[in-house]
Amino acid sequence: MSSAIELLIAAHTALSAVPLRTLRVSCLSPPSVLVSFMDGQSLMWTPKPEPMPMPACDPGVDDSAMLGKALRWLKADCFAEFAVHEELVAANASMFGARGADEVLAFKKSWLRMAKNYEVDAILDVDLKNRVVVASFDCLISGKEGRGTDVMQFDEQMKVSGVAAIRHTQVTS
């Protein structure tokens, strides 16, 4: 795997049969992902072809579509993949002062100018009830570097309807 987001996507793909709560890239060698499931169980996943035991879960709950789309959107932010943004943005999306799909896409194209803009290293929460995915990131954009947390909202069609970013250095009490 060449980046943390690609490792997270590989873990999600391998484990998408069960509802996932969090994914976090580990500093261990070989590269691995600490995974927690909606039922509270957890495991360390490594990208190898050996079969893994799957925890028991409610088969009626499916987070795969939402989490998969969140990971694709985040990867598109990392590597300026605007066609993915175009595919996944909701018509009435609102984020970072942009309102509507056209403004959001224009914002993305003006903001994401580097070959690699972010490093996303963890999915912190998958909230199915509210259609929200929370991820942590490091911004690599010159002059905007720093750690933060994205909160992504999806609409009923599983399109990205909103994103709010919390820059950790800007949190005040």
Image (cartoon, rainbow, N blue to C red):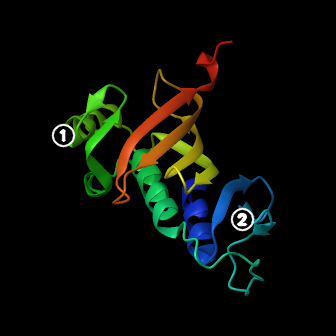
**Residue drawn at point x = 47 percent, y = 20 percent:** 143
**Distance from Cα at disc 2 to Cα at disc 1:** 36 Å
In the image, 165: left or right of 41? Answer: left
Point out the image quarter for the C terminus.
top right
**Residue drawn at point x = 46 percent, y = 67 percent:** 65
Nearer to us in this view, 38 or 71: 38
Residue 99, image x and y in percent?
Answer: 25, 32
**Residue drawn at point x = 55 percent, y = 64 percent:** 9
- Residue type at mark 1 is Asp
Check disc 1 and report the residue beneath it.
102
Of labels 2 and 1, earlier in sequence is 2
Counting the numbered discs, the total is 2
Residue 122, image x and y in percent?
Answer: 64, 49
- Residue type at mark 2 is Phe
- Above or below for 97 versus 150: above
- Above or below for 74 versus 34: above
Q: Are marks 2 and 1 in contact (CB under 8 Å)?
A: no
**Residue drawn at point x = 67 percent, y = 75 percent:** 58
Q: Residue 12 lies in what quarter of the image?
A: bottom right
- Above or below for 57 versus 69: below
Check disc 2 and report the residue beneath it.
37
In the image, 116: left or right of 59? Answer: left
